[in-house]
Image (tube, helix red, strand yellow):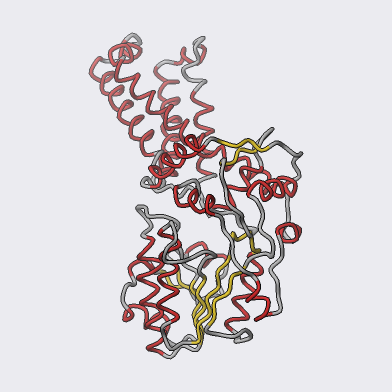
Amino acid sequence: MALGRSASAARRRFPEVSWIEEDIAGLREAAAWRPLVAGCDAVVNCAGALQDGPRDDVRAVQAVAMQALFQACADLGTLRVVQISAAGASSGAATAFMRTKAEADAVLTGLDLDWTILRPGLVLAPTAYGGTALLRALASVPFAMPLPDRTGPIQIVAVDDVAKAVCLAVEGRVPARASYDLVELEPNDLADVVRALRGWLGYAPAPIVRVPRPLVRLVVTISDGLGWLGWRSPLRSTALTQVSAGVVGDPVPWFHASGLTPSDLRISLRRLPSTVQERWFGRLWLLKPVLIAGLSLFWIASGLVGLARFEAAASVLTARGVEAGIAQGAVAAGVVLDLVLGTAMLVRRTMPLAALGMVATTAAYLAAGTVLTPDLWIDPLGPFVKTLPAALLALVAVALAAER
């Protein structure tokens, strides 16, 4: 049985699993959890949120709800609880992400349960999301690889090694009531990680370009702002703080408990396929925000130009026999629609609909224009022809809408 905020896609992929759709942030009391975990021999928590935003409340998800879950497990006598925390989680950490992980860990250790806390480093997985998606993208930049000017050491762990550790803990094959860091033996510099990913992708070596901290902070500030529009960029301030501090742990206790050492960076990469899909993803991931911003700017600018040159725009129709009131109404509707679609493109939740609206609006515009002003198809400035690439880009935006 599995629980998550949105399970529709997971249900299609794994129909044999019983899926429960619940917003974990809203499960703040043990009573809310008891009917959900009743009858479970073991509970594994891998919920998390990088930073607060419209869809995310870090403390609610990682601390408050988890305390309620662990108490429910204690009330029901659940045999084992496995908590996926994070390497470096502590009450004095610099980010709310790490502090709330540590808060939940502390509550769990105080309960009468067979608990195991696993603290992975930077998880490397076939599915690219968050920080690992960003690293793939940085490794795909042509000619040079931009990186922040000051970064700490990083220890990765393959997602397969994390899954194996969870199985061992659930099966009781490692000592319970203990915390284990899941990290490779030796730390890497961030530049070494990106170089290794670039080689794994099959690209020729490229120099590292250190981006000045003020410019990095500007990008992070913009990304934080976009977070309130629903975009979960890994370039937000939490990620910068964590990368600056490093992601490290001690793999020795896990080795003594399990006899296993997580694979290092290069072995982990060899276990993952690097295909054309990976190369497409790395390049398109960086182009996605440029594409969205460009389409938004194009449509907003179109609306503003129509508003500023309202009479001139209406005269294009009246000169061809359209009644003045109808022409002005058509231009006003077009201005409003352009501004609405351009603005909606910037909001994560409405972006796919806005992109489809752009395609539909372009089709309607060309159809109406072909009837009323067919001569504009051969106009030297190409007012009709130039709309076609924008519509095609909107279709690309729809194809890139998925985050996971």
The residue sitting at 29% across, 20% down in the picture is 307
- Residue 92: image quadrant is bottom left
The residue under the point 67% across, 35% down is 144
Residue 245, image x, y percentages: 52, 53
Q: Position of residue 98 (x, y in %)?
A: 45, 62
In the picture provided, is 281 more to the left or to the right than 404? right
User: Depth check: 226 or 284 in front?
Assistant: 226
Number of callouts in the render? 0
Q: Relative to 283, does residue 248 appear above or below in the rendering?
A: below
The front one of 315 and 371 is 315
Residue at the limit of the structure toward the bottom, as seen here: 77
Residue drawn at the location 33% of the way across and 8% of the way down: 319
Q: Nearer the viewer, residue 287 or 364?
A: 287
Q: Is residue 90 above or below residue 134?
A: below
Instruction: Say if 74 sits above or below 359 in the image.
Output: below
Q: Residue furthest left?
A: 325
Q: Position of residue 216 (x, y in %)?
A: 50, 38
Q: Nearer the viewer, residue 166 or 27?
A: 166
x then y, percent, for residue 247: 57, 58
